Image (cartoon, grey):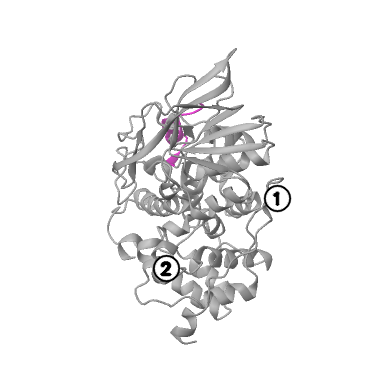
């Protein structure tokens, strides 16, 4: 097919559940491509000689032109293993990564039209493997007799365990919650990431000898030093950003105030949460979007978002914003809460103030400035601040690990090693709340470093990430 013919093909769109139906359940909203649609979308790829989607866009550096090229040739299984060369979680990342800000945001086709739907093509390949009952993981390695501990079962912990287990290490993941997956499971609703996708990854890890211990809080039930005394030769900390950041306004302790990731965790763990009829969500990121859409699915009738900037500045992906509005959630822009009012200890109203955009802040977005005298009141049954999260630092108790000013673990950027040589960290624990792909990449770097550390090798010389 000639380049002009490829340029003439419009971006293919997946089928989606009708909004009126999807707000009644947690079924996956976006359907996978069928074969014809996947092949047609793959034909849109220009196979760039210097693919920015791979070099600048993908945190894992997946060889995107390679797997799309193999898909075009109907070599789907080979395409899958091309992805697996760099990614430990293709079925996950293809669903939850913000592709428009990463690989698709760097796609050359996006300069004069719509980028290639890279995420959907990766998902098609990953799901095809499962649907056709193909093996989704490389053969396991023979045990080498050495033990590694991993704190947290999110994407960072899963990835580190994946690479180390495939080098023969006896890996044990310690998870503080009763369920597995970290933020993938308790922070992302099932309508975006079905639980069977995450569970399949753990089944594959278990088949390679990875042990998983739940309901154990490292730093409380046992310390990092305890793990070392139990014979673990190195520890990887991959805890997520599970602690909600507070608004810091009067009334935040009233009944009816629930914070974003706390609310999602309760719902995703199957606990009944009753927010009432009228719900206000504060924030403009994907967590705020997830909270608002989840509130609809758990019975709230009127849900709207307060955001202090305009829609153009929202950090959430455009697809999630579109889904939100299709489902009936209103975004109240240029507004922020200043006080929560209540009666008898329970929330009754939210006092807000109008904002206007001033000069850009450190992120490049224009800073919101309060408009004096513009206060207004909103009646509500619940308010859910979802403005950001902090990393839970319980795991460092009893061990003097260095922290950044953002209360994340300080590591060597090239090796992911902390100031204590046998402790490594990655993902949210180092970056703060970030994408699954960035956690996967750092975890892969950490896995190689841990292997080199245990084997007494130079942690820097001839690494895979120096060669890529």
Question: Is residue 330 shown to the viewer in this render?
Answer: yes
Q: Which residue is mark 2?
A: 110
The magenta region covers: 221-237
Which class describes the residues within 10 Å of circle 2: few (<14), some (14-19), or many (20+)? few
Above or below, 271 against 326 in this view is above
Q: Is residue 234 magenta?
A: yes
Q: Secondary structure at mark 2?
A: helix
Q: Along the polypeptide, which appears first: circle 2 or circle 1?
A: 1
Which class describes the residues within 10 Å of circle 1: few (<14), some (14-19), or many (20+)? few
**Residue plotted at (47% across, 59% down):** 99
Q: Is residue 23 left or right of residue 383?
A: right
Q: Quadrant of residue 60?
A: bottom left
Q: Which residue is mark 1?
A: 20
What is the tally of numbered marks visible in this picture?
2
Q: Quadrant of residue 338?
A: top left
**Residue plotted at (43% across, 78% down):** 46
Above or below, 447 against 387 in this view is below
């Amino acid at each position: 097919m000639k380049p002009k013919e490829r340029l003439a093909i419009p971006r293919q769109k997946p089928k989606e559940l009708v909004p009126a139906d999807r707000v009644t359940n947690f079924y996956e909203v976006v359907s996978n491509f069928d074969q014809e649609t996947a092949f047609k979308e793959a034909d849109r790829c220009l196979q760039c000689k210097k693919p920015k989607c791979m070099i600048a866009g993908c945190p894992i550096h997946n060889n995107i032109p390679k797997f799309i090229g193999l898909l075009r040739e109907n070599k789907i299984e080979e395409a899958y293993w091309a992805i697996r060369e760099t990614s430990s979680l293709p079925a996950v990342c293809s669903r939850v990564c913000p592709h428009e800000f990463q690989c698709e945001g760097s796609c050359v086709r996006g300069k004069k039209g719509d980028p290639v739907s890279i995420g959907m093509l990766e998902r098609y390949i990953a799901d095809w493997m499962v649907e056709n009952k193909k093996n989704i993981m490389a053969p396991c390695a023979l045990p080498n007799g050495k033990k590694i501990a991993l704190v947290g079962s999110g994407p960072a912990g899963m990835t580190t365990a994946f690479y180390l287990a495939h080098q023969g290490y006896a890996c044990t993941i310690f998870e503080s919650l009763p369920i597995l997956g970290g933020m993938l499971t308790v922070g992302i609703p099932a309508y975006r990431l079905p639980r069977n996708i995450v569970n399949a990854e753990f089944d594959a890890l278990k088949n390679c000898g990875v042990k998983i211990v739940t309901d154990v809080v490292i730093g409380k039930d046992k310390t990092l030093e305890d793990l070392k005394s139990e014979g673990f030769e190195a520890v990887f900390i991959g805890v997520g950003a599970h602690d909600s950041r507070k608004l810091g306004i009067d009334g935040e302790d009233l009944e009816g105030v629930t914070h974003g990731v706390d609310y999602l965790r309760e719902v995703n763990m199957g606990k009944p949460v009753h927010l009432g009829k009228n719900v206000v969500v504060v924030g403009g990121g994907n967590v705020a979007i997830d909270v608002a859409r989840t509130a609809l699915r758990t019975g709230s009738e009127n849900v709207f978002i307060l955001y202090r900037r305009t829609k153009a500045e929202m950090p959430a992906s455009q697809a999630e914003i579109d889904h939100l509005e299709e489902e009936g959630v209103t975004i109240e822009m240029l507004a922020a809460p200043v006080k929560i009012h209540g009666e008898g200890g329970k929330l009754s109203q939210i006092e807000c103030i109008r904002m206007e955009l001033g000069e850009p802040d450190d992120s490049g977005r224009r800073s919101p400035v309060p408009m004096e005298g513009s206060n207004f009141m909103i009646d509500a049954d619940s308010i859910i601040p979802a403005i950001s999260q902090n990393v839970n630092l319980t795991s460092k108790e009893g061990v003097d690990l260095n922290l950044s000013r953002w209360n994340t673990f300080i590591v060597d950027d090239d090796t992911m090693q902390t100031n204590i040589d046998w402790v490594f960290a990655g993902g949210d624990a180092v970056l703060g709340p970030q994408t699954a792909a960035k956690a996967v990449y750092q975890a892969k770097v950490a896995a190689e470093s841990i292997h080199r550390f245990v084997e007494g090798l130079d942690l820097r010389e001839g690494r895979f990430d120096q060669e890529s």
